Image (cartoon, coloured by chain):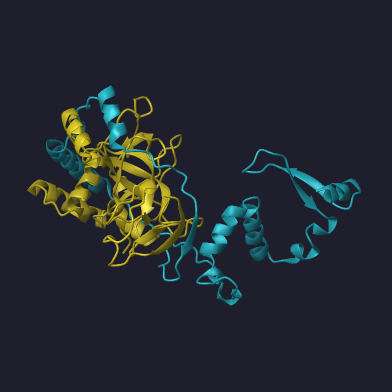
Amino acid sequence: MGITQLIDPFYIDMSGERFRDKPTLGQLCWVPSPQPDIIPQIFEVQRADPTEHNITKFTIRNVQETDFQRKDELPLYRLRLRLNEELIIQKAKRRPAIVLPTTNTVFDDVITFLKSKGKKHLQQDSILVVPIFGIEKPDHPQGFPPIMTARIKALMYDQFFYCPKTPSGMTPIEGVARLDRIQVIFPVHRASYKPLPIRLSDDAIPILMNLLRAWVRIKGTTEDEKYLKELRELLKETLPG
Amino acid sequence: MEAIKRAVDEGFIEAFPYESQFYDEEHYLYKHRADREPAIASSLPFYIAGPLQGAVRKWAGDTYALLDHVYFETEPMMSVQPGDLLDFSSAQEPEPIKHISMKKLSKQKIAKGKQLISKIRENQEKYIRLDRDRPIYDDAYFEALDYLNGDALDFPVQGEAKIEDSVTKFD
């Protein structure tokens, strides 16, 4: 109910297309999705011996104000860990996600230049994905509770977008796409990005994009703002009193 | 294992083959006659026996999922430290998930909503490129990408990790 009363179909089957060729706007995929901690945690590495690069001791601890300023420790060649750099450790889960492709312009001559300067991280092929989190069920008590799910279905949150259950025969996915957990992915390896043969429909995509626009506080055109407001007013009527 | 095999051969216990969810090898469940459902099971009220049998069916054969549930979703395990006695009085019956019924829109309202979505879609098509030109994916691109991804680290890096007591717990 809610937004799903107005969008039909919600998904488009891409299995007849070359869905692995390129990440398509609204396409579903599987990605490892990290859980950012309120206090990031450092995976502190200590050398076993100052004269060698083997590392055998690690400590997991909360980030401190003095981190990222290391100047009095030897760099760790084996981990490519340089001065003023730390390793962050995070919990992560494999989640379904929605693709928001980006257009990274890559020039061959600039690559050659960057290569010669050792600035290889400045041109990379990346996309954004919006991870999908589960809703509360008897076997998934930590999911979004019903009252929030109902409000999300009524488009009351800028940062949450409800994804109904995918049609039978497709990968079963249902949940809430969280724009507040949007992440960067390099779609080059199947373990870090597995595209699925299904995408949001042409009616569902503009709603997600409008929420994204509103969430990052970009003012839309007068019509954008008006239509979204009217749609929200309408969907408010689907909420229980 | 030899002692178990002998006990089976001599009829002290029985071996029941079962299919593991995790491994292909043949597995057996060993039972003694006394393990059969005790008389008390039939005298339990249905509201106890039902959920109990459901729990056994749900977790039987999946020790990993059972431990994950016990560690992270049961009250006696909340905030315990190794060596603590578990306080089962804190266990609570799980609250049933409250179903929230959303209201159905009238036909007219659905038509209005669809019209709004259509307008949003048309408006957006002016500003967002749903497709993009395919970049040149040639040998030069992939060679460059390999370079950009950098040298692979010499994994695995092995060692012992200590977790400081002050580490903020996840969740």
Q: Residue at x 21, y 45 (%)?
A: A209
Q: Residue furthest left?
A: A222
Q: Which chain is yellow?
A: A
Residue B47 % position (x, y): 64, 64
Say which colour chain B has: cyan
Left or right position of B9 against B147 = right
Left or right of A68 in this view: B162: right
Does residue B84 show up?
A: yes
Position in image of residue A71 (x %, y %) = 27, 60
* Residue depicted at x 35% and y 29%: A20
Residue sitting at the far top = B138
Q: Compared with residue A63, is residue A169 higher up or lower down, i.e. above or below? A: above
Viewer-nearest residue: B51 or A76:
A76
Residue B171 seen in render: no
Q: Residue B107 falls in which quadrant of the image?
A: top left
- State the residue in front, A5 or A110: A110
Residue drawn where x is 75% and y is 66% of the image: B43
Foreground pick, B37 / B49: B37
Q: Quadrant of the C terminus of chain A?
A: bottom left
Q: Can you give x and y, in whole percent of width and height, for residue A25 in the image?
A: 26, 37
